Amino acid sequence: MEHVDTVVVGSGFGGSVAAYRMAEAGRSVVVLERGRAYPPGTFPRSPAEIGRAFWDPEAGLYGMFDVWSFKGFDSVVSSGLGGGSLIYANVLLRKDERWFVTDLPGGRHEEWPVSRADLDPHYDAVEKMIGTAVYPLDRPPYDHTPKAHAIQDAAAELGLHYSRPPLGISFAPSPGAEPGVGLPLAEPSYGNVHGVPRRTCRLCGECDIGCNDGAKNSLDHTYLSAAAFHGADLRTEHEVKGIRPRPGGGYEVDYVHHDVNVRKDRRPVRTIACERLVLAAGTYGTTYLLLKSRAALPGLSGALGTRFSGNGDLLTFLLKAKDRDRVRPLDASRGPVITSAIRLPDALDGAPGAGPGAYIQDGGYPSFVDWMVPGLEPDEQIVRVVKFLWQRFVEFFKDAPDTNVSAELSDLIGDGALSVSSLPLLGMGRDAADGRLELRGGRLNARWSAESSRAHYARLRKTMRAIADVLGAEYADNPIWFRKRVITVHPLGGAPMGRHEGEGVCDAFGEVFGHPGLYIADGAAMPGPVGPNPSLTIAAMADRLSTRALENAASRGRSTHTPPRDGAQRTHDAPDTGAGPASGEAGPSGGAGNGTAYEADSGRPERDRGTSPGADARTSLSFTEVMKGFVTFGEDDPRAGELAGARERITLRLTITADDVDRFLDEPEHTARADGWVESAGCGGRRAVLRGWFNCLAPAGAEDRRLMKYRLHFTDGEGRPRTLTGQKNVLHGPPTRIWPDTSTLYVRILDGHVPEGGDADAEVLAAGVMHIRLPDFARQLTTFRTSGPDCAAALVRFGRFFAGELWEVYGPDAA
């Protein structure tokens, strides 16, 4: 049986990020994607091509659009290398800081297990990797985009908050260059899996049916290409059918290969084994797999299938816009699908009576339908709008299999055209996550209704009507709204995260409770609606998940590390995307561990050491800390380096591990190992710690002084050896000094890999000061882990040691 370190199921915003992070860290990775690859120029356009562009293997259809129809709503998701990024509208908004809650009955709120502060560094990393830009509305020829100006004008008139959201689109041929239409795009350093040239955006409105120019920075052009560069095996037309634990640890994954060139009624089921399994098949796919595999995965939380929502999606239309007595052109087909966003505040923002927050965005449709002739009666206008909506997703849905929406659309679709004075409006927000996904007759079924989110939809419709009035347009609901049905392209939930298995299926890092090494990395893990477009949040969650998974593997000392084909150091090099360095807790360019764990007193990796007698009796302890601050290159004094005008940001994320707590506490220097990364632009971005030491409250000569020391060996972006050395000075003083002393790290970056005692002879390249911020410290307290026969006692002993040492320093002033 084939065996790899990591199998990733699906290649959307969760799977692609996880695949890249694991491959970049040197793990052997296989991505199983049920759909096929779509290089630029291969997306369907003709009626004949679009008629086959649906996903239903039983009917011999292996296309991109997967259409679901349930009681109360319809849904469109994607199948193909890159997942939902192939058909999403490019918007990459962060989840609003105060919206990290799930609404409960009775007006109560439940905090998410993660916060905006947790995700911000991962948001940074994803934005850098994908490459975002706002629509350049202030420059020709982009300034001639009527729909963007119309939304901006309406927002100003109504006093609403308007913005141009970050888009995953290339308007310029390279980062920092002037934008231009249809210009050749520069290739990133990691290349492109398709090997097909790309061009900047042509403003053709085809984003939602696949970008044939490659201007859309979809995941196949970014994360998946980088993953392949680092050795990931991307297997398209491979559909996963079942999962189960593997005897002895890890998981087995059953799949079939849909070879479209070979006609077979039944395809053989194959199996691949892995140490780590990442489920990222989308909300429907992941939840369906877990429901089907429930018997094989004993102990799965009862929360499986719960907290389903459509992210508040609602689509309406503006028709026959006028400016005085003349037609007001809105020209929905010019530009990308979305250029603008209006944010409706949330009661949690401090807006009394506002209710849950929401967004309204302009829509678009492919310019190749512009030949249709406008001028029909209002009822026929609505028919035209319905046609637009479904062309925007799938052109002709009447050929879509296994849904009941096809006949309805067939009745509604006519021979009409979209008017230049019409515009779709896309709404979304914090609806009620009270739906449930379940199996019925072996098929996935959803129980959800718009009724419990009545206030949300009423607010969206009221605001959209006001926009229509300002623009002199007629307002029209989606024609299927009369049945209180909605169409969602943002299904979320089904395998939600929680603080414990009674609340969720997985923890805040996506790891399934009771099944170590099994992760959920897509929209299924959301414990409620995101509010804005959820793609960026899903990707950031996956980046955070990957950091934790790599740390776990490093802390366990696993030997599953497989060096990449072009050298171990490359596993720590971030692909050059032409953007500035990411900052914060985590990002796409570095896992926390490099697959090699060291003991403090040994120059040999753990995997090379023999097991000593009694080793199984040891109890280990670990925790993770994050420090952030500033350094200045060319400065050797830390305080001066923190304040200099040429300073730059620096971040540390370290997992401190004492493999034997008794030994760690008994030895005078209290030495543990440090794994993780250093991130600084002057060092080439994020650099993995190759070998690191930490001393906890080591003696410093005086009875009332202790040192917390750090020594980290790494290499910079050009492969040159570097050492970060730092210390926290714990000095006698009032108890109010405990926090600043224990949270302030004075650092220097030295040339070479400098051993203990060699600092005086080393060249100082940079110096500065770093701090543990209170939110990071609060999270640090949740990261303490113990392993071994005496976990509880070890944790208590460590706590007493730490408190006792601090009392020795500060106690006299407190007495």
Image: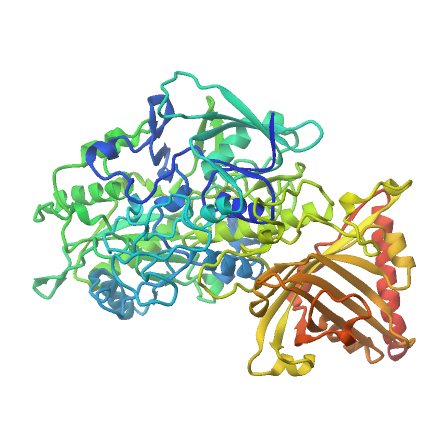
- Count of labels in the image: 0
Q: Is residue 559 left or right of residue 205?
A: right
In this view, 810 is above or below 521: below
Looking at the rendered image, the quarter that the C terminus falls into is bottom right
Does residue 431 appear in this view?
yes
607 and 670: which one is in front?
607
Q: Quadrant of residue 93?
A: bottom left
| Rendering coords of residue 23 (x, y %) | 56, 45
Q: Residue at x 48, y 53 (%)?
A: 537
In this view, 364 is above or below 740: above
Looking at the rendered image, the quarter that the N terminus falls into is top right
Q: Residue at x 23, y 39 (%)?
A: 45
Q: Is residue 636 left or right of residue 461?
A: right
124 and 91: which one is in front?
124
In this view, 53 is above or below 533: above
26 and 106: which one is in front?
26
| Rendering coords of residue 659 (x, y %) | 82, 50
